Amino acid sequence: MDPLFEFCLRMGDNTLVLGHRVSQWCGHAPVVEEDIALANTALDLIGQTQLWLGLAGEVEGKGRDADALAFRRDAWDFRSVLLVEQPNGDFGNTLLRQYLFDEWQALMLAALKRSTDTRVAAIAAKAAKEVAYHVERSRGTVVGLGDGTAESHAKMQAALDRLYPFVGELFATDATDEAVAEAGIAPLPSDLRAAYDAALAATMAEATLTIPDSRWTHAGGRDGSRHSEHLGHLLTEMQWLQRAYPDATW
Amino acid sequence: MSKEWPLWEIFIRSQNGMSHRHMGSLHAPDAETAIRNARDVYTRRAEGVSIWVAKAADITASSPSDKGPLYEPSESKVYRHPTFFDIPDEVGAM
Amino acid sequence: MYAQMVKSTGLGVKSRDEMSPEEARFQDRIDAGDKIEPKDWMPEGYRATLIRQIAQHAHSEVVGQLPEGNWITRAPTLERKAILLAKVQDEAGHGLYLYCAAETLGVSRDELTEALLSGEMKYSSIFNYPTLSWADIGAVGWLVDGAAIMNQVPLQRTSYGPYSRAMIRICKEESFHQRQGFDIMMKMANGTEAQRRMAQDAVNRFWYPSLMMFGPSDKDSVHSAQSMAWKIKINTNDELRQKFVDQTVPQAHYLGLTIPDEALAFNEDTGHWDYSEPDWSEFYAVLKGNGPCNDERMAARKTAWDDGQWVRDGLLAHAEKRAHRTAAE
């Protein structure tokens, strides 16, 4: 597979799956201000998906557009990390998952703005502005809930313990990553880890939360070798109309 | 019932050069969150470039009965308005 | 119309002789087209009626997220997903503007929320109907938002300043909502056989509930008479319903869809469409809690509120801790 195509899928599938997850909150948030904020995040992620999967289709050159890639691929062809496939859980779990992803995405996009591929750089420049705000918001909420009441602290610590074992996959580096790094298209994910760890340590200290010692990580999403069971259900729901009425336009 | 988040009044400057304008209010636990909420609530259609927030409870408002003394004296000073003065057309724009 | 059957004082409109000097001055201001602002003197009945009406409208916006939110995760394209999400987000925003308008009258949002969850306050009957196919999302935008706009446009001129300003903002933002619904309906009506069936089925199910949104005839209602004297209600329910039917029937014809009313006919004498009344016993049953989705809607809002408690408490506790720390420095 063309490494650039694969790379675009990884970027776009992450935002697609996470955007879908966040959109599930619509109408169910703790206050109406949060309903609105979560919808903004989801909207940004869906917009980024259109750009990344649009570019993927262009690179592939087989006439598949962003919708074809989003709605007509089965789970094993997806390249989303397991972190974003995880169910929403409670509001704290959702915002912590968001923060863990946002901090990575911000670093990745900052590097991608210097990509040798001008299309990649252009998407990154647009998305980076949105993500800078996502980090600010998710970080503020994680700190607030971590350093809130005893109950909110306990829930956030449980969420961190649950989700931290999915962080390492964001920095996994394989032949695809080496190929796009070689071409100057994207950084090696492993090179982003130090900055990520520093940001995470600062946030969690402020949030009075303890980062688990073990760096052991689940993996299998970003290379499609073993997704979570959750992804299949998510796609079943998301792709249903396109699958059930393949000859329709919407 | 637990304590409610305070109410904040939101002022937004819509484009550089214009004054901040009252847009509405919202609830938030603190000022920083109020600014973030204001961004999400009141700039969904790219309405603003700068946001002020003020706790509603901290705003002192004039009372309606002051309306006469506060504002009516200026009503008689019509010469403050440019339309008070008739300038002949041939003088041109002024 | 998101506020249905809002009770006013129930005493009818006072004659000038019955009014106190304050009430008379207040009515003069309303008659002169003045806006009433939060700190101005106002009759208790005016305040109480407005709180009921604005809160019911706000609750409707917030509960109204649910039937449309039901399809966000199943929207058929990325663009449709984004548009629907943006629209439902707007509904949340409108709920927020309206809660804030109600709060200027001396109630808190938490009190209003508790009143909704206890069943003491109502929301529009329309949101107790299910969205069963993608065409329902089109029908909700086209018919439900179309009906809501009929009521909201005149309410921009309502006498209470904060309410009027909220409605102006809402109407500005709503302008794309009905269009996106009609746009979906056009795609469906001109689509495959299955899509056409979905479209017709959606119209069949949403037509009468949309007519019910305006509420039963209120031409003899003492509540409505008082609200109209106070300019917190601008038109009668029948006027708005007729306007809606007149506007919508040609649009349905354009789509090639059938309005499920055999009596529907253009009346040359009146220049309006004659139509059948909805089944008002169904309307009252829905208001009483026996609509197809009342239980689900209330359960969803209650869960959101209860499950959100620790979040609201946690963030506030953090804000207070930080304020103390800053004060101690």
Image: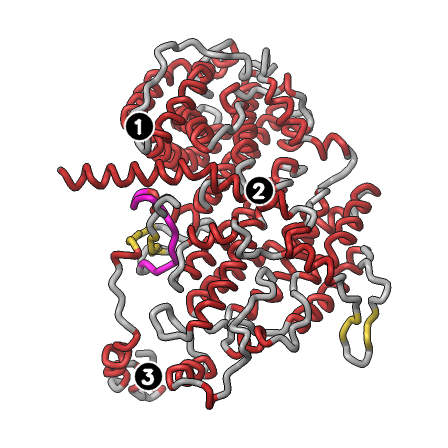
The spot of residue A150 in percent (x, y) is: 33, 29
Q: Name the residue carrying label 2.
A: C299
Q: Quadrant of the C terminus of chain C?
A: top left
Secondary structure of the residue carrying tag 2 is helix
- Gap in Å between the C-alphas at discs 2 and 1? 32 Å
Q: Give the amino acid at mark 3.
A: Thr
Q: Residues within 10 Å of mark 1 (few under 14, many from 20)?
A: many
Q: Is residue A58 shown above or below A177?
A: below
Residue C83 visible in the displayed image: no
* Chain to which mark 2 belongs: C
Report the front residue among C163 and B86.
Answer: C163
Secondary structure of the residue carrying tag 3 is helix
Question: Is residue C24 one of those drawn in magenta?
Answer: no
Residue A80 visible in the displayed image: yes
Q: Residues within 10 Å of mark 2 (few under 14, many from 20)?
A: few
Q: Give the amino acid at mark 1.
A: Ala
Mark nearer the viewer, 3 or 1: 1
Q: Name the residue carrying label 1.
A: A207
Q: Give the amino acid at mark 2.
A: Ala
Q: Quadrant of residue A63?
A: top right
- The residue lying furthest to the right in this view is C262
Mark nearer the viewer, 2 or 3: 2
Tag 2–tag 3 contact (CB < 8 Å): no
- Gap in Å between the C-alphas at discs 2 and 3? 61 Å
To the question of a shared chain for discs 3 and 1, the answer is: no
Could you tell me which residue is drawn at 82 percent across and 78 percent down?
Answer: C268
Taking C228 as reference, is A138 left or right? left
Report the front residue among C66 and A150.
Answer: A150
Could you tell me which residue is drawn at 55 percent across and 16 percent down?
Answer: A221
Q: Name the residue carrying label 3.
A: B83
The magenta stretch spans which residues? B20-32
To the question of a shared chain for discs 2 and 3, the answer is: no
